[in-house]
Image (spheres, rainbow, N blue to C red):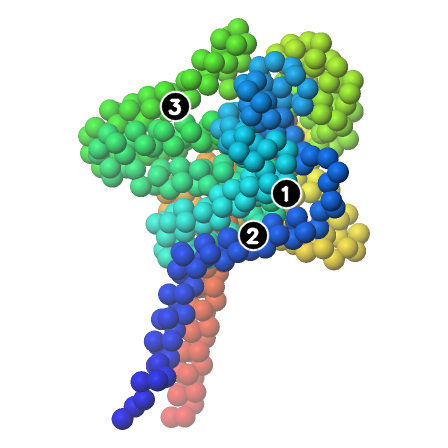
Amino acid sequence: MPSNSHPAPWQLEDRIRKILISRRNIFFLALLARFLYLFLYFHGLPPHAGGYLLGQETGSIAASIAAGHGFSSPFYLPSGPTAWVTPVFPYILGAVFKMFGTYTFYSSLVIRALNVLFSALTCYPIILLGTKLFGDTVGATAGWIWAFLPMAISLPVTWAWDMSLTALLLTIALYLTYTIDDRQNAAAWTLYGFVWGFTALVNAATLTVFPGCLLFALYRCKQRGSGWLRLGSLAMLTFVLTVSPWIIRNQLVFHGKVLFRSNFGLELWLGNNPEVPDTWTWWLHPLDSPAEYKKFARLGEVGYSEEKKAAAVQFIKTHPADVARFQFHRFMETWTGNSDSFADIWAMRIFTLRCELLMNYGLALFTLIGMLIAHRKMRLLSLPLLNVIVFFPLVYYLCHTTPRYRHPMDPVLALLSAYALVCGAREIIAWTKDASHKKAGLLAAAGR
């Protein structure tokens, strides 16, 4: 009798496959990797004599909220009401400050742990989206890429900012975009509008992505039957109702001069002025320049931003060649993590930099390949993904960028890279089998 203690090869293969495609396993290991990095991050910090300053403008606003002064003062000193950033993450951080103390060790630990949780949870919508579009192998591969993507491990810990929460919400919104079309009930489309509205209140850059995704969902809904106009109107109404309290507040407080954020003029000027070397002039930010902070305090938030916007627009008009050069460098930094050329960085002969360089270029390359394959095989279904990678970074090409600004769309990059890798692996396997069959045929013919 055959022994049951040893599973057959096909059974073992099936068990391994189930382990590898398990969403729970991927999430757990992603969470473990991030918490390990969090431990190493705090273990490597020197003892702090003072407070744990974190979050920059977001942290300053959160401290103001925790102190009972409302949504105000983005630069540590009292400066009145602000719309410098969108409200959700500052209020989350403000609640953390209220419970664990403003700028304390425990507050720093808790907000970074929350970011770690947001980042690890992003595995779920990535896997669901990948499985729906490309099958469970691609979905699981995308989940594993996200679980161990260095930027997805480090950024939630090193930055107390909204990137990890935005990445989670944007991926959920994308998944809903692909699944909402066959729902004919009002509740589903109301939820769809709310998710996009809430995501915009976390990060206003996602506003560039919402119209294209909504049009895609409506087009697919129209193909499936009637009622698309009513459902689309309901989603749009819910979106407007979700963001309108923030907009109404800004219109009243800033006398009709601010909608979502008040800092666009400064961000545009930081990347478009005579002192820009290649991407932007970070040292001229009011947080880093006492002279600029004094000007901010004298003119007020709106007046200061309007002055900087006028100066930036004038520079853009009179220096088109410089602006084009800046935008090229920002494009490169967005997609490769560096504004310098591959050859210049490689020539530094620093091992860690070379590894980072290969990873960044590899991710960008596989994203492009995956997008091209998806567009060729499933032209319509690829459009929301294309919409994200084209429109989300546009504002950063115009103003200035860092790798963390791109992070909210990194789940899409992980998904498309996974698709490229799986397609490539399948092609290699198919080619190998075909070659083996041909060789076996030749040997059989020779034997006869």
Separation (CA) of disc 3 from disc 2:
33 Å
In front of the other: label 3 or label 2? 2
Question: What's the amino acid at mark 3?
Answer: Thr
Instruction: Name the residue at 75% across, 14% down.
Output: 294
Looking at the picture, tell me which residue is in the foreground, 81 or 186. Answer: 81
Looking at the picture, tell me which residue is in the foreground, 412 or 376. Answer: 412
Q: Where 134 falls versus 172 (above or below)?
A: below
On the image, which quarter does residue 431 sit in?
Answer: bottom left
| Residue 448, x across and y down, in percent | 38, 93
Disc 1 target residue: 158
Task: Please state the total of marks drawn on the protein image.
Answer: 3
| Residue 208, x across and y down, in percent | 48, 28
| Residue 130, x across and y down, in percent | 40, 50
In front of the other: label 1 or label 3? 1
Residue 322 seen by the camera: no
Instruction: Name the residue at 30% across, 29% down.
Output: 190
Question: What's the amino acid at mark 1?
Answer: Thr
Q: Earlier in the sequence, mark 1 or mark 2?
A: 2
| Residue 49, x across and y down, in percent | 75, 38
Disc 3 target residue: 242
Check disc 2: other Cα within 10 Å, few if <14, some if 14-19, many if 20+.
Answer: some
Residue 298 seen by the camera: yes
Check disc 3: other Cα within 10 Å, few if <14, some if 14-19, many if 20+.
Answer: many
Quadrant of the frame with the N terminus? bottom left
